[in-house]
Image (cartoon, coloured by chain):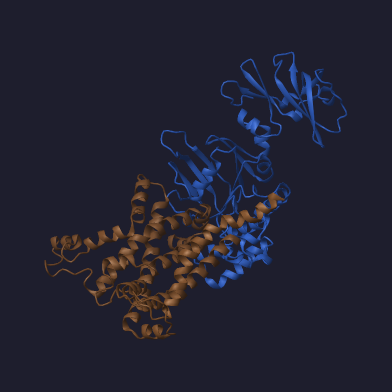
Chain colours: A blue, B brown
Amino acid sequence: MAVVETRSLTKVFKEGTLGAVNDVSLATGEGEFLVFLGPSGSGKTTLLRMIAGLETPTSGAILIGGRDVTNLSPRERRIAMVFQSYALYPHLSVYNNIAFPLKAQKVPRDQHRKKVEWAAGLLGIGALLDRKPRELSGGERQRVALARAIVREPAVFLLDEPLSNLDAKLRTSARAELEQFQKRVGTTTIYVTHDQVEAMAMGDRVVVMDKGRVRQTGTPAEVYDEPADTFVATFLGSPPMNLVSGGGTITGFRPEHFLPALALADPGSVPMRFTFSHEEYLGAERILYGTLADGAFAGSKAVSRIASTHAGRFAKDSTYDFAVEKGRLKLFDAATGIRKA
Amino acid sequence: MSARSGDRWLGPAMFLPAIAYILALVGVPLVLAVLYAFSDARIGTSGIHLVGFENFRSVLESPSFRKAIRNSIVFTLSAQAIVILCSNVLAMALEKPFRGRGLVRFVILLPWVAPVSLGTIGWKWILDSIYSVITWVLVALHVYKPYAAPMWLGEPRLAMASVVLVHCWRLIPFSTVIMLAGRTAIPKEIPEAAAIDGAGFWRTLFQINLPMMTPILSVAVLFGIIFTFTDMTVVYILTAGGPFDSTQTLPSLAFATGIAGSDLAAGAAISLFLVPVLVGVAYLMLRVAHRTEVV
């Protein structure tokens, strides 16, 4: 177990250009599941690779378990990594893939079988030990990669989009399994993804990144309910938060809080007039698209997300009474996008 | 109907030139060589008079032939070992981008582009007993006294070493290009995963990179064996097999006996001893190619 900490970590690939990672300082908790979330090009993978020792930082420091590892090679960092492509050794059997870190770390040979069987058992791949990676399905490969990571009991797990090569159905079950697995072994884990559902579902905390900078760090509920700026507000949530501007301020509210006025009993809610344009029916819910009518935000696009159990019918180009609870309104600075209230 | 009959004839018609080419340039000489090997043909004789295994018997008894077989094996194996080692090192050095990499790659490829005979003639002068620049440099550095310097092509061991090294000079570029292709084909996450798993340079090289390059490595080795085992240009130009047959290989002996010595029958018999080795190599090559396709 160990805590990973970065101090003002920066990586500039080409001199004179904007860094891929800029001045990132963060720290994991003991045994925490920390997720780096961001769009592609946000620097999350570069940050992870620097922690792994695969990229050399331009400046800043990395500490693992309180030890400065900035200039140490990957093998000296006591980390394990699962790659997006799994990076299994294609010429080795599953057994030898899992045993490879043991050999490389010079673990006494007589312990290999026991440890490999323990790791394989933990992931339910005990029956596959004689196969070659090419004979495995995507899900099985992912487990082999995890078994190879866990076998030498590393201080930290680094996972780079390990679920993105699985099909949608398998991804959901693998996500739950991975989460359970991490809780069971209790190893500090850093997980990189661009998928907000994965981040919200698995992370103890989420680090939202954009353009090489950390925009916000917090629990899934914090980053979703109390976004630090307009980037976080719109990156998380599908459909994203409604942002309407007026009077030097951007006002944000989530589609699921923007409801027909009748559905809101709270007398303190803020009324808004909504001109309906079209609707998407998604089974459990309905997404209503339209614009706000009259008031300071007239003409701004807005989206409402209501349960399919809501019986209301909406006609194109008609205007209806909608409302948002007062506490659900988030205010951002119009110039910087930073949260004001 | 006409389209169908067209189909029937078009395929074979397209094939015909290739078949004619192979028959004329490979098939006929091979049959002729086998025929000569069992006859007493000499340059200038007409008609074929078969003598059974007489040629093979006399060839096997000759000390020159045994020496040539031994030399061929030494020549092929040592040249291949050096080529594989050097081309791997070069491929590793040339893999990562650096300033001037394109120029270095070009320079390394040059020996392969130059005609073998011209390149070898250049080496003949470099290694010459009187005009050798190597000797000149060594004398200037006071390593050797003038007139006591080694005769690169005149002493049996040095001559063999020279022939092997010139051959390596010629084969390394080709092998390097193949190795470079092999290394580039390894996804970069795999050595990265090995580094994180705790493997150092040698373990990554011998347990990850080289095994993953096996198919392409075997292609390089098999091609190299064919090029080396059948080569006579380098030997013929540098030493013509001498001194005292110390650099004579099977192809050069076959040439010396059959063409220069005008004993066609004995020359053909000697060259037929190349066949089993080449058949073996060809078989292995086809197997490697097949395995690479299947995977």
Q: Nearer the viewer, residue A71 or A104?
A: A104
| Quarter of the image where the C terminus of chain A is located | top right
Q: Residue at x 44, y 52 (%)?
A: A72
Q: Is residue B121 left or right of residue B19?
A: left
Percent coordinates x, y for residue B211 in the rendering: 50, 64
- Residue at coordinates 61% horizontally, 70% vertically from top-left? A114
Q: Where residue B182 sits: x, y (%)?
A: 48, 57
Tell me where residue A307 sits by quadrant. Answer: top right
Tell me if I can see residue B44 in this picture: yes
- Horizontal and vertical percent for residue A40? 58, 38
Looking at the picture, does residue A83 appear above or below residue B149?
above
Q: State the residue at coordinates (41%, 33%).
A: A16
Does residue A286 appear left or right of residue B253 in this picture? right
Where on the picture, by quarter, is residue B251? bottom left
Extreme residue toward the right, this view: A311
In this view, the residue farthest toward the left is B146
- Examine the rendering and report whether any part of residue B212 can be seen: no
Q: Position of residue B240 (x, y in %)?
A: 27, 70
Image quarter of residue A270: top right
**Residue drawn at (65%, 35%) of the image:** A223
The quadrant of the picture occupied by the N terminus of chain A is: bottom right
Using residue A24 as the reference point, say whether residue A200 is left or right of it. Answer: right
Residue at far front of view: B46
Please give the count of numbered marks on the rendered protein: 0
Q: Which of the two residues, A341 or A98, is positioned nearer the viewer here?
A: A98
Of A146 and B121, nearer the camera is: B121
Up the image or down, B15 lies above or below B40; here it is above
